[in-house]
Image (spheres, rainbow, N blue to C red):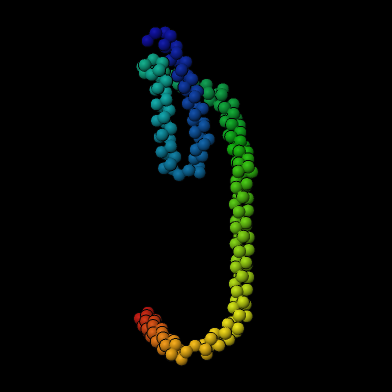
């Protein structure tokens, strides 16, 4: 390992030690251990340490092909100590500022979307429903009015039509009247049988239910 490689390794490991300290504070800030279950904290801790170890090894591999020396561990500790004593307070303030900035930005975006997208869509939907109900009520009222007019017309015309039919009936031949009466009696008897059969079926079904 050349002197340049050793210097690059020391500098990168000091930087990785400082970065590890920043990542640890960021992880602690977002984890909120007191609000999490113990098994979930345990799993998150294991994953965090594995990821940090892989990142450090990857940087070490890029610098010196993954050769590990004792001074590399010392460089990591020095970088972590330098972060704790010099950078931690500044980084934590910057982290809180970034979190507040992201939260405020997200709230502004949410309010803008609500004002420009959600509320207009809800308003259009309510307007469409109101229009449909208004048209439906109007059509129902119109149909109801027409139906009443038709019923009144039938009642009004039923008596004259009945008188005309009676006069026509009196003029018809007796033989035709007998045929019509015979057909009517047969039809009435047939429908009466069907009605009785249906009534028996309904009574049988009610008894079976009980």
What residue appears at the point 59 percent right and 52 percent down from the top-left corner? Answer: 125
Location of residue 122 with respect to 158 vertically, above or below: above
Q: Quadrant of the C terminus?
A: bottom left
How many circles with numbers are drawn on the protein? 0
Q: Is residue 50 left or right of residue 122?
A: left
Q: Position of residue 10 (x, y in %)?
A: 45, 15
The residue lying toward the viewer, choosing from 161 and 100, is 161
Please identify the quarter of the rendering in which residue 181 is found. Answer: bottom left
Q: Position of residue 33 (x, y in %)?
A: 49, 40
Q: Position of residue 1 (x, y in %)?
A: 37, 10
Residue 164 appears in view: yes
The residue lying toward the viewer, choosing from 68 and 141, is 141
Please identify the quarter of the rendering in which residue 66 is found. Answer: top left
Residue 199 appears in view: no
What residue appears at the point 41 percent right and 11 percent down from the top-left corner? Answer: 5
The residue lying toward the viewer, choosing from 55 and 34, is 55
Location of residue 40 with respect to 204 vertically, above or below: above
What residue appears at the point 63 percent right and 40 percent down from the top-left corner? Answer: 112
What residue appears at the point 41 percent right and 86 percent down from the top-left corner? Answer: 183
Location of residue 144 with respect to 164 vertically, above or below: above
Location of residue 37 with respect to 143 vertically, above or below: above
Q: Position of residue 44 (x, y in %)?
A: 43, 37
């Amino acid at each position: 390992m050349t002197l340049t490689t050793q210097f690059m390794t020391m500098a990168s490991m000091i930087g990785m030690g400082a970065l590890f300290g920043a990542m640890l504070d960021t992880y602690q800030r977002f984890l909120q251990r007191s609000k999490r279950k113990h098994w979930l904290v345990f799993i998150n801790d294991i994953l965090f340490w594995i990821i940090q170890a892989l990142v450090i090894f990857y940087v070490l591999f890029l610098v010196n092909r993954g050769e590990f020396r004792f001074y590399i561990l010392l460089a990591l500790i020095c970088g972590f100590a330098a972060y704790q004593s010099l950078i931690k307070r500044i980084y934590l303030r910057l982290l809180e500022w970034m979190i507040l900035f992201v939260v405020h930005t997200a709230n502004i975006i949410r309010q803008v979307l609500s004002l420009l997208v959600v509320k207009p869509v809800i308003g259009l939907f309510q307007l469409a429903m109101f229009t449909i109900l208004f048209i439906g009520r109007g059509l129902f009222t119109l149909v109801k009015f027409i139906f009443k007019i038709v019923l009144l017309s039938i009642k009004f015309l039923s008596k004259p039509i009945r008188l005309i039919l009676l006069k026509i009936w009196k003029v018809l031949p007796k033989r035709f009247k007998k045929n019509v009466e015979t057909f009517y009696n047969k039809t009435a008897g047939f429908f009466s049988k069907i009605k009785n059969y249906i009534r028996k079926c309904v009574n049988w079904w009610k008894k079976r239910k009980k």
